[in-house]
Image: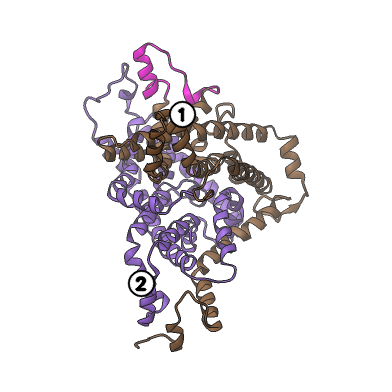
Amino acid sequence: MAVNCLYTINIRIHCYVNSIFWMLSTALKESWQVFEYPVRWIPDPIRWDNFITTFTSLPFGKWALNTAFITLLTIIGTLFSCTIVAYGFARFKARGKDVLFMLMLATMMLPGAVTMIPVFYLFLKLEWVNTYLPLIVPSFFGNAFFIFLLRQFFLTLPIELEEAARIDGLNTIGILYRIILPLTVPALITVAIFQFNGAWNDFMGPLIYLNKPELYTLSLGINFFKNVNETQWNFLMAASVVTMLPSLILFFLGQKYFVESITLSGIKG
Amino acid sequence: MATDQKKPIHKNDNQSVHRKKSWWNSSRKETLTFYLLISPWILGFLFFIGGPMIASLYFSFTNWDLFTSPKWVGFDNYVYAFTKDPLFKQSIKVTLIYSLFSVPIGMVASLLIALLLHQGVRGMRVFRTIFYLPAVVSGVSVMVLWMWIFNPEIGLFNTILGYIGIQGPKWIYDPDWALPSLIIMSLWSVGGGMVIWLAGLNSIPNYLYEVAKIDGANAWHRFRYVTIPMLTPTIFFNLVMGIIGALQSFGEAYVMTGGGPLNSTLFFNFYLFQKAFEHFQMGYASALAWVLFVIVLFFTLLVVKSSKLWVYYEGERR
């Protein structure tokens, strides 16, 4: 039974976590320099090994890989589902389309808390708790904000290209794949970067669904580390900085794309 | 005609321009294609939004611990929240104060920065990057960074204040300062709205400013009577998004303060999370979620309804 299982897992985790806490807090007590007064702005000696210590004393590498895995799959899911749905909303006429589109925009206003508990129950029944499926699978069903962004982008593309392609005998999937996608690269990069930041920094999702330390993502790991011993500022900061790096690098690489596509999406009224 | 499709298309369908519904057949095909394309979202809506909404509405009228079957209790959860639960009132108060301050302050700050950048200062790209960076970096690592900034002994703020000879407050460890600290921290992400401000500023036609100049308007007048009215749609968008986001704050309370000290940072969403995943009071938590939904809806509709009075869209008056 899932019920008993959850309880025993919880109890076992608590023992496990407590022993890790104790080990860590003893293993890491060597940071007397943090409390020096006056504060040294430039540490002396510079403890580059803090980074190394951080990554060896905790499974940070594992957590980083876990996070990267989840992030990558949600990006694939988001790009796949949002592109298809956005193309449908941008180019096809059908009864009920406007109502559905308004409904989709309205879901952006819905607090996550309203759906959180039943969705958790659903995944619990599917026995997906303590797997990555609850974090990955929903991304394959579209995201209202990204669909809106991509639809706005598709509307700016000249329809003649698609008409010509259709006359040449391409079907809808072919048109989407061969004509639309190559032209949509900037918007897709924007969506991918947003999704990366969302998934990479997601906290509540992993917090609810993952409670085994070996499954942790970086956000959970850092939070866990913080609870161990709040005075380990040097290690904590080292871990945080490393966690921020991918987002920063992506931002620099993708800057011009998303300023461009946000401007294009005409959020102005 | 090389078609590798299963269904052969009638030739006359091809010749009819795609936008014209000339054939009943083709329009039906179009409808089918549309629904096939958006089917991922429809399924997602049923499984992850619509269905769960109905379920959580039902759960909010029950007592439920996730493990035994829900017991129907009618309006008890709601009555208890509004009449007996002191933490409920506290969490509403904290969340409203937080939103009331962080949203307008954040909007003013990001608009000022956007105006500055829009003046076309040299090194605009560099500035834009600097201001936008914080918006990109978010999550637990940022909260840890701010915990260090707020640290009473070794933190950045109190160290700087110490140089001036001021004994700084205990920030997030002081019940009176904790919520203001989180409001200050919310300024970290002003860059997020900035790109949207810039897009709005870019779309204001230059001739309006020139005409205003000819009419003898000074810089303040131009800002007050040209920029602000033309920006109202952007203000509207940022306001709605800001309110929806702020009312649902969670991470800061969970990671930085644990809702304390003395429940001074007990965000509504954090309280709800505790009820659900720490006390397993799923029925009560569902009721809280619906209260939150009504609050979000109320403020959003307030802004939307009032927008007729203050939001100016181009093309309204021709």
Q: What chain does mark 1 sit on? A: B
Task: Look at mark 1 in the image and give the residue it sits on.
Answer: B184
Secondary structure found at label 1: helix
> Which colour denotes chain A?
purple
Q: Which residue is drawn at 37% across and 22% down?
A: B154
Q: Where is residue A163 in the image (x, y as percent from the top left)?
A: 39, 75
Q: What chain does mark 2 sit on? A: A
Q: Is residue B84 above or below residue B240?
A: above
Q: Which amino acid does label 2 sit on?
A: Leu
Secondary structure found at label 2: helix
The numbered dot on residue A161 is 2
Decide if residue B195 is on the left or right side of residue B234.
Answer: left
Label 2: how many residues lie within 10 Å, few (<14), some (14-19) or many (20+)?
Answer: few
Q: Is circle 2 on the same chain as circle 1?
A: no
Label 1: how many residues lie within 10 Å, few (<14), some (14-19) or many (20+)?
Answer: some
Q: Does the magenta stretch include residue A75?
A: no
- Residues in magenta? B151-176
> Which colour denotes chain B?
brown
Q: Residue at x 60, y 54 (%)?
A: A4
Q: Quadrant of residue A168?
A: bottom left
